[in-house]
Image (spheres, coloured by chain):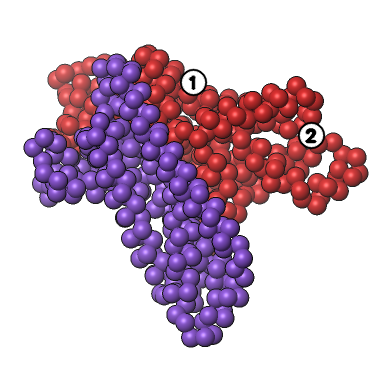
Amino acid sequence: MGNYLLMFSLFLRVVLILAFMVLCFAPWEAFFGAEVDLSSILEGPSVDHPFGTDNLGRDLLVRISDAFRFTVLPLWGFVLIGFFLGVSTSFITICNSQRWFKWAGQLTGVLAFIFSIVPIGITVFYFSVYFEKNGLMPVIYSVTIIVFAKSYLMLHQLYSRDQGLLYWDFHRSMGGELSSRVWHYGINQHWKGYLGYELAFYLKVSVIAEVSVSYLGFGAQEPNASIGNILSAHFSEALKGPSHVMLVVLLALVLVMSLPNLMRLTVIKLLKIETPTCTRGGLAQHQ
Amino acid sequence: MLKYFYTTGLIFLIGLFLSLLFAIFYYEWISFYRRGAKIKLVQGFVPIPSLLLGPPLILLFYKCFSWNLIYPVHMYADFYQIFFSAWVPALILIVASGLYSGLKDSLCQEFLFWRSKPFFLFSTSLGLKPSKTLRKIVLLRSLSQSWLRSLPWFFGELLVVEAVFNAPGLAYEAWSFAKVRDQVGMANSMISILIIYLICLIVFKSLNRWLGGKLSSYV
Protein backbone atom coordinates (compact mmCIF):
# COMPACT_ATOMS: atom_id res chain seq x y z
CA MET A 1 0.00 0.00 0.00
CA GLY A 2 2.82 2.37 0.97
CA ASN A 3 4.62 1.61 -2.26
CA TYR A 4 1.51 2.40 -4.33
CA LEU A 5 1.09 5.68 -2.50
CA LEU A 6 4.70 6.60 -3.17
CA MET A 7 4.29 5.74 -6.84
CA PHE A 8 1.08 7.76 -6.98
CA SER A 9 2.71 10.81 -5.38
CA LEU A 10 5.61 10.54 -7.83
CA PHE A 11 3.15 10.29 -10.71
CA LEU A 12 1.25 13.33 -9.43
CA ARG A 13 4.46 15.33 -9.17
CA VAL A 14 5.45 14.44 -12.73
CA VAL A 15 1.96 15.39 -13.96
CA LEU A 16 2.13 18.79 -12.24
CA ILE A 17 5.61 19.48 -13.60
CA LEU A 18 4.40 18.52 -17.09
CA ALA A 19 1.34 20.76 -16.65
CA PHE A 20 3.64 23.69 -15.90
CA MET A 21 5.81 22.87 -18.93
CA VAL A 22 2.77 22.67 -21.22
CA LEU A 23 1.31 25.91 -19.81
CA CYS A 24 4.66 27.59 -20.24
CA PHE A 25 5.92 26.42 -23.61
CA ALA A 26 2.89 25.55 -25.75
CA PRO A 27 2.07 28.25 -28.37
CA TRP A 28 -1.33 29.09 -26.87
CA GLU A 29 -1.54 32.48 -28.56
CA ALA A 30 -1.69 30.70 -31.94
CA PHE A 31 -4.90 28.92 -30.86
CA PHE A 32 -6.71 31.45 -28.69
CA GLY A 33 -5.29 34.85 -29.63
CA ALA A 34 -3.89 37.39 -27.20
CA GLU A 35 -5.52 40.60 -28.44
CA VAL A 36 -7.91 42.85 -26.54
CA ASP A 37 -11.55 42.07 -27.31
CA LEU A 38 -13.95 44.35 -25.48
CA SER A 39 -16.97 42.37 -26.66
CA SER A 40 -15.97 39.36 -24.54
CA ILE A 41 -15.00 40.84 -21.19
CA LEU A 42 -14.85 38.51 -18.16
CA GLU A 43 -16.32 35.51 -19.95
CA GLY A 44 -16.33 32.16 -18.18
CA PRO A 45 -14.43 29.10 -19.38
CA SER A 46 -15.51 27.88 -22.83
CA VAL A 47 -14.09 26.05 -25.85
CA ASP A 48 -12.86 29.35 -27.31
CA HIS A 49 -11.26 30.40 -24.02
CA PRO A 50 -10.48 27.39 -21.75
CA PHE A 51 -9.73 29.58 -18.70
CA GLY A 52 -12.12 32.38 -19.65
CA THR A 53 -11.21 35.99 -20.44
CA ASP A 54 -9.91 38.90 -18.36
CA ASN A 55 -11.23 42.44 -17.84
CA LEU A 56 -10.09 43.46 -21.35
CA GLY A 57 -11.39 40.35 -23.09
CA ARG A 58 -7.95 38.77 -23.46
CA ASP A 59 -7.64 34.99 -23.19
CA LEU A 60 -6.63 34.10 -19.65
CA LEU A 61 -4.73 30.97 -20.64
CA VAL A 62 -2.49 33.04 -22.90
CA ARG A 63 -2.04 35.66 -20.14
CA ILE A 64 -1.02 33.05 -17.57
CA SER A 65 1.27 31.34 -20.06
CA ASP A 66 2.88 34.76 -20.73
CA ALA A 67 3.24 35.36 -16.99
CA PHE A 68 5.05 32.04 -16.60
CA ARG A 69 7.19 32.48 -19.69
CA PHE A 70 8.22 36.12 -19.39
CA THR A 71 8.12 36.68 -15.63
CA VAL A 72 8.65 33.46 -13.70
CA LEU A 73 11.24 31.81 -15.95
CA PRO A 74 13.62 34.83 -16.21
CA LEU A 75 13.28 35.30 -12.45
CA TRP A 76 14.20 31.68 -11.78
CA GLY A 77 17.10 31.95 -14.24
CA PHE A 78 18.58 34.83 -12.25
CA VAL A 79 17.90 33.08 -8.94
CA LEU A 80 19.93 30.12 -10.24
CA ILE A 81 22.75 32.47 -11.30
CA GLY A 82 22.72 34.19 -7.89
CA PHE A 83 22.72 30.85 -6.10
CA PHE A 84 25.63 29.38 -8.05
CA LEU A 85 27.61 32.62 -7.77
CA GLY A 86 27.00 32.70 -4.01
CA VAL A 87 28.00 29.07 -3.51
CA SER A 88 31.11 29.35 -5.71
CA THR A 89 32.23 32.64 -4.09
CA SER A 90 31.78 31.05 -0.69
CA PHE A 91 33.73 27.97 -1.83
CA ILE A 92 36.60 30.14 -3.08
CA THR A 93 36.79 32.26 0.08
CA ILE A 94 36.67 29.18 2.33
CA CYS A 95 39.38 27.33 0.41
CA ASN A 96 41.87 30.19 -0.06
CA SER A 97 43.79 31.11 3.03
CA GLN A 98 45.74 34.00 1.43
CA ARG A 99 45.36 37.37 3.13
CA TRP A 100 43.74 39.05 0.13
CA PHE A 101 41.08 36.34 -0.10
CA LYS A 102 40.46 36.51 3.64
CA TRP A 103 39.79 40.25 3.49
CA ALA A 104 37.59 39.88 0.43
CA GLY A 105 35.75 37.03 2.14
CA GLN A 106 35.17 39.07 5.30
CA LEU A 107 33.95 42.07 3.31
CA THR A 108 31.60 39.89 1.25
CA GLY A 109 30.42 38.24 4.48
CA VAL A 110 29.53 41.60 6.06
CA LEU A 111 27.66 42.77 2.91
CA ALA A 112 25.90 39.42 2.62
CA PHE A 113 24.86 39.62 6.28
CA ILE A 114 23.40 43.11 5.79
CA PHE A 115 21.40 41.95 2.75
CA SER A 116 20.28 38.74 4.41
CA ILE A 117 19.01 40.38 7.59
CA VAL A 118 16.54 42.74 5.88
CA PRO A 119 13.18 41.10 4.96
CA ILE A 120 13.19 40.11 1.29
CA GLY A 121 9.75 41.68 0.65
CA ILE A 122 10.92 45.07 1.90
CA THR A 123 14.21 44.95 -0.05
CA VAL A 124 12.53 44.00 -3.34
CA PHE A 125 9.83 46.65 -2.88
CA TYR A 126 12.39 49.35 -2.05
CA PHE A 127 14.58 48.49 -5.07
CA SER A 128 11.56 48.50 -7.38
CA VAL A 129 10.46 51.94 -6.21
CA TYR A 130 13.95 53.40 -5.95
CA PHE A 131 14.94 52.58 -9.54
CA GLU A 132 11.62 54.00 -10.78
CA LYS A 133 11.50 51.55 -13.67
CA ASN A 134 8.52 49.53 -14.75
CA GLY A 135 9.30 45.95 -15.48
CA LEU A 136 11.03 43.03 -13.96
CA MET A 137 14.63 44.20 -13.87
CA PRO A 138 14.66 45.88 -10.39
CA VAL A 139 12.95 42.81 -8.94
CA ILE A 140 15.42 40.51 -10.67
CA TYR A 141 18.46 42.52 -9.51
CA SER A 142 17.33 42.63 -5.90
CA VAL A 143 16.33 38.96 -5.76
CA THR A 144 19.65 37.92 -7.34
CA ILE A 145 21.64 39.94 -4.81
CA ILE A 146 19.64 38.54 -1.88
CA VAL A 147 19.96 34.95 -3.13
CA PHE A 148 23.70 35.49 -3.64
CA ALA A 149 24.04 36.80 -0.07
CA LYS A 150 22.00 34.05 1.50
CA SER A 151 23.67 31.19 -0.39
CA TYR A 152 27.09 32.67 0.41
CA LEU A 153 26.25 32.71 4.13
CA MET A 154 24.63 29.27 4.00
CA LEU A 155 27.76 27.54 2.68
CA HIS A 156 29.83 29.30 5.34
CA GLN A 157 27.38 28.08 7.99
CA LEU A 158 27.55 24.50 6.73
CA TYR A 159 31.34 24.70 6.65
CA SER A 160 31.63 26.04 10.20
CA ARG A 161 29.19 23.35 11.38
CA ASP A 162 31.05 20.44 9.76
CA GLN A 163 34.70 21.50 9.94
CA GLY A 164 35.10 19.94 13.40
CA LEU A 165 33.85 16.51 12.28
CA LEU A 166 36.20 13.59 12.93
CA TYR A 167 36.57 12.52 9.34
CA TRP A 168 37.49 16.08 8.37
CA ASP A 169 40.24 15.97 11.02
CA PHE A 170 41.37 12.61 9.74
CA HIS A 171 41.48 13.84 6.15
CA ARG A 172 43.49 16.89 7.28
CA SER A 173 45.99 14.76 9.17
CA MET A 174 46.43 12.57 6.09
CA GLY A 175 47.52 15.68 4.16
CA GLY A 176 44.22 16.23 2.32
CA GLU A 177 43.43 19.66 0.96
CA LEU A 178 40.63 21.84 2.30
CA SER A 179 39.11 22.32 -1.17
CA SER A 180 38.93 18.57 -1.59
CA ARG A 181 37.16 18.19 1.75
CA VAL A 182 34.66 20.97 1.02
CA TRP A 183 33.94 19.57 -2.43
CA HIS A 184 33.96 15.80 -1.84
CA TYR A 185 32.62 15.57 1.71
CA GLY A 186 30.51 18.70 1.57
CA ILE A 187 29.02 20.04 -1.63
CA ASN A 188 29.11 16.75 -3.52
CA GLN A 189 27.96 14.62 -0.57
CA HIS A 190 26.29 15.69 2.65
CA TRP A 191 25.42 19.28 1.77
CA LYS A 192 23.74 18.35 -1.52
CA GLY A 193 20.38 17.82 0.18
CA TYR A 194 20.60 21.14 2.05
CA LEU A 195 21.64 23.01 -1.09
CA GLY A 196 18.71 21.54 -3.01
CA TYR A 197 16.31 22.43 -0.21
CA GLU A 198 17.57 26.00 -0.07
CA LEU A 199 17.54 26.43 -3.84
CA ALA A 200 13.91 25.27 -4.00
CA PHE A 201 13.11 27.66 -1.16
CA TYR A 202 14.74 30.63 -2.94
CA LEU A 203 12.86 29.83 -6.15
CA LYS A 204 9.57 29.82 -4.23
CA VAL A 205 10.43 32.98 -2.32
CA SER A 206 11.43 34.83 -5.49
CA VAL A 207 7.98 34.11 -6.94
CA ILE A 208 6.31 35.35 -3.73
CA ALA A 209 8.38 38.56 -3.83
CA GLU A 210 7.68 39.21 -7.51
CA VAL A 211 3.96 38.54 -7.21
CA SER A 212 3.68 40.81 -4.16
CA VAL A 213 5.56 43.69 -5.80
CA SER A 214 3.54 43.36 -9.03
CA TYR A 215 0.32 43.33 -7.00
CA LEU A 216 1.38 46.61 -5.38
CA GLY A 217 1.77 48.20 -8.82
CA PHE A 218 5.53 47.97 -9.21
CA GLY A 219 7.54 45.22 -10.93
CA ALA A 220 5.84 43.77 -14.02
CA GLN A 221 3.07 46.07 -15.26
CA GLU A 222 0.44 46.04 -17.98
CA PRO A 223 0.51 45.03 -20.79
CA ASN A 224 3.18 42.60 -19.49
CA ALA A 225 1.60 39.72 -17.65
CA SER A 226 2.39 38.75 -14.09
CA ILE A 227 0.29 36.78 -11.63
CA GLY A 228 0.47 39.76 -9.25
CA ASN A 229 -0.81 42.37 -11.69
CA ILE A 230 -3.57 40.08 -13.06
CA LEU A 231 -4.73 39.50 -9.48
CA SER A 232 -4.57 43.19 -8.64
CA ALA A 233 -6.59 44.14 -11.77
CA HIS A 234 -9.36 41.66 -10.95
CA PHE A 235 -9.70 41.91 -7.18
CA SER A 236 -12.31 44.67 -7.13
CA GLU A 237 -14.15 43.14 -10.10
CA ALA A 238 -14.32 39.80 -8.33
CA LEU A 239 -16.12 41.50 -5.44
CA LYS A 240 -18.76 42.86 -7.79
CA GLY A 241 -19.12 40.09 -10.35
CA PRO A 242 -17.64 36.79 -11.54
CA SER A 243 -14.64 35.54 -9.63
CA HIS A 244 -13.37 32.82 -11.99
CA VAL A 245 -10.35 34.94 -12.97
CA MET A 246 -9.24 35.14 -9.33
CA LEU A 247 -9.67 31.40 -8.94
CA VAL A 248 -7.64 30.57 -12.05
CA VAL A 249 -4.88 33.02 -11.13
CA LEU A 250 -4.68 31.73 -7.56
CA LEU A 251 -4.44 28.14 -8.82
CA ALA A 252 -1.65 29.21 -11.18
CA LEU A 253 0.10 30.82 -8.21
CA VAL A 254 -0.19 27.62 -6.17
CA LEU A 255 1.24 25.61 -9.08
CA VAL A 256 4.17 27.90 -9.68
CA MET A 257 4.93 28.17 -5.97
CA SER A 258 4.90 24.46 -5.32
CA LEU A 259 6.84 23.58 -8.47
CA PRO A 260 10.40 24.07 -7.09
CA ASN A 261 9.71 21.75 -4.19
CA LEU A 262 7.98 19.22 -6.44
CA MET A 263 11.00 19.23 -8.73
CA ARG A 264 13.35 18.85 -5.78
CA LEU A 265 11.41 15.89 -4.39
CA THR A 266 11.23 14.22 -7.81
CA VAL A 267 14.98 14.63 -8.35
CA ILE A 268 15.65 13.26 -4.84
CA LYS A 269 13.43 10.26 -5.55
CA LEU A 270 14.92 9.55 -8.95
CA LEU A 271 18.58 10.11 -8.05
CA LYS A 272 18.25 8.81 -4.45
CA ILE A 273 19.97 11.87 -2.93
CA GLU A 274 20.48 12.14 0.82
CA THR A 275 18.08 14.76 2.24
CA PRO A 276 18.33 16.85 5.40
CA THR A 277 16.30 15.16 8.11
CA CYS A 278 15.33 18.41 9.75
CA THR A 279 14.61 21.80 8.26
CA ARG A 280 15.49 23.95 11.23
CA GLY A 281 18.91 25.01 9.92
CA GLY A 282 19.78 26.77 6.73
CA LEU A 283 18.04 29.75 5.29
CA ALA A 284 15.13 29.67 7.67
CA GLN A 285 17.41 30.57 10.54
CA HIS A 286 20.01 32.84 9.06
CA GLN A 287 17.67 35.12 7.16
CA MET B 1 2.85 58.86 11.48
CA LEU B 2 1.45 57.99 14.92
CA LYS B 3 -1.82 56.80 13.38
CA TYR B 4 0.08 54.45 11.04
CA PHE B 5 2.30 53.20 13.83
CA TYR B 6 -0.79 52.50 15.91
CA THR B 7 -2.35 50.21 13.24
CA THR B 8 0.87 48.29 12.58
CA GLY B 9 1.52 47.95 16.30
CA LEU B 10 -2.01 46.67 16.85
CA ILE B 11 -1.63 44.05 14.09
CA PHE B 12 1.71 42.95 15.52
CA LEU B 13 0.39 42.69 19.11
CA ILE B 14 -2.70 40.75 18.02
CA GLY B 15 -0.42 38.45 16.01
CA LEU B 16 1.69 37.89 19.11
CA PHE B 17 -1.41 37.15 21.17
CA LEU B 18 -2.87 34.77 18.55
CA SER B 19 0.40 32.87 18.27
CA LEU B 20 0.53 32.49 22.06
CA LEU B 21 -3.06 31.24 22.09
CA PHE B 22 -2.36 28.76 19.32
CA ALA B 23 0.83 27.56 21.04
CA ILE B 24 -1.03 26.93 24.31
CA PHE B 25 -3.84 24.97 22.63
CA TYR B 26 -1.51 22.97 20.44
CA TYR B 27 0.78 22.19 23.36
CA GLU B 28 -2.16 20.96 25.44
CA TRP B 29 -3.26 18.79 22.54
CA ILE B 30 0.10 17.11 21.95
CA SER B 31 0.90 16.79 25.63
CA PHE B 32 -2.45 15.40 26.75
CA TYR B 33 -4.17 13.66 23.84
CA ARG B 34 -1.08 12.40 22.06
CA ARG B 35 1.03 11.61 25.11
CA GLY B 36 1.46 7.93 24.31
CA ALA B 37 0.96 8.20 20.57
CA LYS B 38 3.70 8.88 18.07
CA ILE B 39 3.94 12.57 17.31
CA LYS B 40 4.30 13.26 13.63
CA LEU B 41 6.91 15.89 12.87
CA VAL B 42 5.64 18.22 10.19
CA GLN B 43 7.92 20.00 7.75
CA GLY B 44 8.49 23.22 9.61
CA PHE B 45 8.44 26.78 8.38
CA VAL B 46 6.37 27.01 5.22
CA PRO B 47 5.80 30.65 4.23
CA ILE B 48 2.74 31.18 2.03
CA PRO B 49 2.13 34.38 0.05
CA SER B 50 -0.52 36.44 1.79
CA LEU B 51 -2.03 37.08 -1.65
CA LEU B 52 -3.12 33.47 -1.59
CA LEU B 53 -4.98 34.01 1.68
CA GLY B 54 -6.08 37.65 1.89
CA PRO B 55 -8.09 38.30 -1.31
CA PRO B 56 -9.91 34.90 -1.28
CA LEU B 57 -10.84 35.39 2.36
CA ILE B 58 -12.22 38.89 1.70
CA LEU B 59 -14.12 37.55 -1.30
CA LEU B 60 -15.47 34.55 0.60
CA PHE B 61 -16.70 36.54 3.57
CA TYR B 62 -18.18 39.26 1.37
CA LYS B 63 -19.99 36.90 -1.02
CA CYS B 64 -21.14 34.29 1.50
CA PHE B 65 -21.85 36.37 4.63
CA SER B 66 -21.91 39.97 3.25
CA TRP B 67 -19.22 40.65 5.81
CA ASN B 68 -16.67 43.32 4.95
CA LEU B 69 -13.18 42.46 6.16
CA ILE B 70 -11.58 45.59 4.70
CA TYR B 71 -10.58 48.27 7.20
CA PRO B 72 -13.02 51.09 7.92
CA VAL B 73 -12.00 54.65 7.09
CA HIS B 74 -9.84 55.72 10.01
CA MET B 75 -11.46 59.15 10.42
CA TYR B 76 -14.97 57.79 10.88
CA ALA B 77 -14.14 54.66 12.84
CA ASP B 78 -13.92 54.28 16.60
CA PHE B 79 -11.27 52.27 18.43
CA TYR B 80 -13.32 49.05 18.55
CA GLN B 81 -13.92 48.98 14.80
CA ILE B 82 -10.21 49.40 14.15
CA PHE B 83 -9.35 46.88 16.85
CA PHE B 84 -11.64 44.19 15.43
CA SER B 85 -10.50 44.88 11.87
CA ALA B 86 -6.91 44.10 12.84
CA TRP B 87 -7.63 40.47 13.76
CA VAL B 88 -7.96 39.02 10.25
CA PRO B 89 -4.77 40.69 8.90
CA ALA B 90 -2.93 39.46 11.99
CA LEU B 91 -4.22 35.94 11.46
CA ILE B 92 -3.21 36.00 7.80
CA LEU B 93 0.24 37.29 8.69
CA ILE B 94 0.70 34.44 11.16
CA VAL B 95 -0.09 31.84 8.51
CA ALA B 96 1.68 33.65 5.66
CA SER B 97 4.89 34.25 7.60
CA GLY B 98 5.24 30.53 8.31
CA LEU B 99 4.74 31.14 12.03
CA TYR B 100 1.83 28.70 12.19
CA SER B 101 3.71 25.81 10.56
CA GLY B 102 6.97 26.69 12.31
CA LEU B 103 5.27 26.80 15.69
CA LYS B 104 3.63 23.42 15.14
CA ASP B 105 6.95 21.89 14.18
CA SER B 106 8.84 23.57 16.97
CA LEU B 107 6.31 22.57 19.65
CA CYS B 108 6.49 18.91 18.59
CA GLN B 109 10.29 18.88 18.47
CA GLU B 110 10.72 20.65 21.78
CA PHE B 111 8.14 18.45 23.48
CA LEU B 112 9.84 15.26 22.21
CA PHE B 113 13.26 16.60 23.19
CA TRP B 114 12.37 17.60 26.73
CA ARG B 115 10.18 14.54 27.31
CA SER B 116 13.23 12.32 26.92
CA LYS B 117 15.15 14.14 29.69
CA PRO B 118 15.63 12.48 33.11
CA PHE B 119 14.15 15.44 35.02
CA PHE B 120 10.83 14.85 33.25
CA LEU B 121 10.80 11.18 34.32
CA PHE B 122 11.71 12.23 37.84
CA SER B 123 8.91 14.78 38.08
CA THR B 124 6.31 12.35 36.65
CA SER B 125 7.45 9.71 39.14
CA LEU B 126 6.69 12.25 41.87
CA GLY B 127 3.13 12.44 40.56
CA LEU B 128 3.35 15.83 38.85
CA LYS B 129 1.23 16.39 35.74
CA PRO B 130 3.42 15.73 32.64
CA SER B 131 1.95 18.58 30.64
CA LYS B 132 2.52 21.04 33.50
CA THR B 133 6.18 20.06 33.96
CA LEU B 134 7.20 21.02 30.45
CA ARG B 135 4.67 23.73 29.61
CA LYS B 136 6.76 26.77 30.39
CA ILE B 137 9.97 25.45 28.81
CA VAL B 138 8.36 24.18 25.60
CA LEU B 139 6.09 27.17 25.08
CA LEU B 140 8.77 29.78 25.69
CA ARG B 141 11.37 28.07 23.53
CA SER B 142 9.00 27.29 20.67
CA LEU B 143 7.53 30.76 20.61
CA SER B 144 10.86 32.54 20.69
CA GLN B 145 12.38 30.28 18.03
CA SER B 146 9.38 30.43 15.72
CA TRP B 147 9.00 34.18 16.00
CA LEU B 148 12.71 34.65 15.32
CA ARG B 149 12.41 32.58 12.15
CA SER B 150 9.19 34.21 10.95
CA LEU B 151 9.93 37.86 11.73
CA PRO B 152 11.40 38.72 8.29
CA TRP B 153 8.36 37.19 6.60
CA PHE B 154 5.96 38.86 8.99
CA PHE B 155 7.35 42.30 8.18
CA GLY B 156 7.85 41.51 4.48
CA GLU B 157 4.25 40.38 4.04
CA LEU B 158 3.00 43.37 6.03
CA LEU B 159 3.21 45.45 2.85
CA VAL B 160 0.82 43.21 0.94
CA VAL B 161 -1.54 42.56 3.85
CA GLU B 162 -1.95 46.25 4.65
CA ALA B 163 -2.49 46.99 0.96
CA VAL B 164 -5.07 44.22 0.53
CA PHE B 165 -7.00 45.11 3.69
CA ASN B 166 -6.57 48.85 3.21
CA ALA B 167 -5.13 48.97 6.72
CA PRO B 168 -3.57 52.38 7.41
CA GLY B 169 -0.32 51.09 8.85
CA LEU B 170 3.33 51.99 8.28
CA ALA B 171 3.64 49.68 5.27
CA TYR B 172 0.47 51.16 3.76
CA GLU B 173 1.92 54.62 4.26
CA ALA B 174 5.14 53.55 2.51
CA TRP B 175 3.10 52.17 -0.37
CA SER B 176 1.07 55.38 -0.63
CA PHE B 177 4.28 57.45 -0.78
CA ALA B 178 5.74 55.05 -3.34
CA LYS B 179 2.69 55.44 -5.62
CA VAL B 180 3.22 59.20 -5.82
CA ARG B 181 7.00 58.73 -6.13
CA ASP B 182 7.72 60.48 -2.83
CA GLN B 183 10.99 58.72 -2.10
CA VAL B 184 11.76 60.65 1.08
CA GLY B 185 8.38 59.87 2.63
CA MET B 186 8.70 56.25 1.60
CA ALA B 187 12.21 55.99 3.03
CA ASN B 188 10.94 57.41 6.34
CA SER B 189 8.17 54.82 6.58
CA MET B 190 10.52 52.03 5.55
CA ILE B 191 13.06 53.08 8.16
CA SER B 192 10.31 53.06 10.83
CA ILE B 193 9.33 49.52 9.81
CA LEU B 194 12.96 48.42 9.81
CA ILE B 195 13.54 49.92 13.26
CA ILE B 196 10.53 48.04 14.69
CA TYR B 197 11.71 44.89 12.93
CA LEU B 198 15.26 45.22 14.29
CA ILE B 199 13.98 45.86 17.83
CA CYS B 200 11.79 42.73 17.62
CA LEU B 201 14.70 40.76 16.16
CA ILE B 202 17.00 41.82 18.99
CA VAL B 203 14.34 41.05 21.63
CA PHE B 204 13.60 37.55 20.28
CA LYS B 205 17.28 36.80 19.70
CA SER B 206 18.17 37.85 23.26
CA LEU B 207 15.26 35.84 24.65
CA ASN B 208 16.39 32.81 22.67
CA ARG B 209 19.98 33.15 23.85
CA TRP B 210 18.96 33.73 27.46
CA LEU B 211 16.68 30.68 27.39
CA GLY B 212 19.37 28.56 25.75
CA GLY B 213 21.85 29.48 28.46
CA LYS B 214 19.36 28.88 31.22
CA LEU B 215 18.18 25.52 29.90
CA SER B 216 21.64 24.18 29.09
CA SER B 217 21.99 23.07 32.72
CA TYR B 218 18.75 21.00 32.59
CA VAL B 219 19.40 17.27 32.49
Q: Which chain is red?
A: A
Q: Are marks 2 and 1 on the same chain?
A: yes
The correct choice, above or below, for A157 with respect to B208 in the image is above
Residue in the picture at 72% in, 46% down: A162
The answer for how far apart the CA atoms under marks 2 and 1 are is 30 Å
Marking on residue A179: 2
* Coordinates of residue A281 in the picture (x, y in percent): 58, 48
Chain B palette colour: purple
The correct choice, above or below, for A123 with respect to B13 in the image is above
Q: Which residue is mark 1?
A: A141
Marking on residue A278: none
The correct choice, above or below, for A151 with respect to A126 in the image is below
- Which is more toward the observer, A154 or B2? B2
* Coordinates of residue A33 in the picture (x, y in percent): 29, 19
- In the image, A103: left or right of B116? right
* Coordinates of residue A207 in the picture (x, y in percent): 43, 32
Between disc 2 and disc 1, whose residue precedes? 1
Q: Amino acid at mark 1?
A: Tyr
Residue A9 visible in the current orientation = no
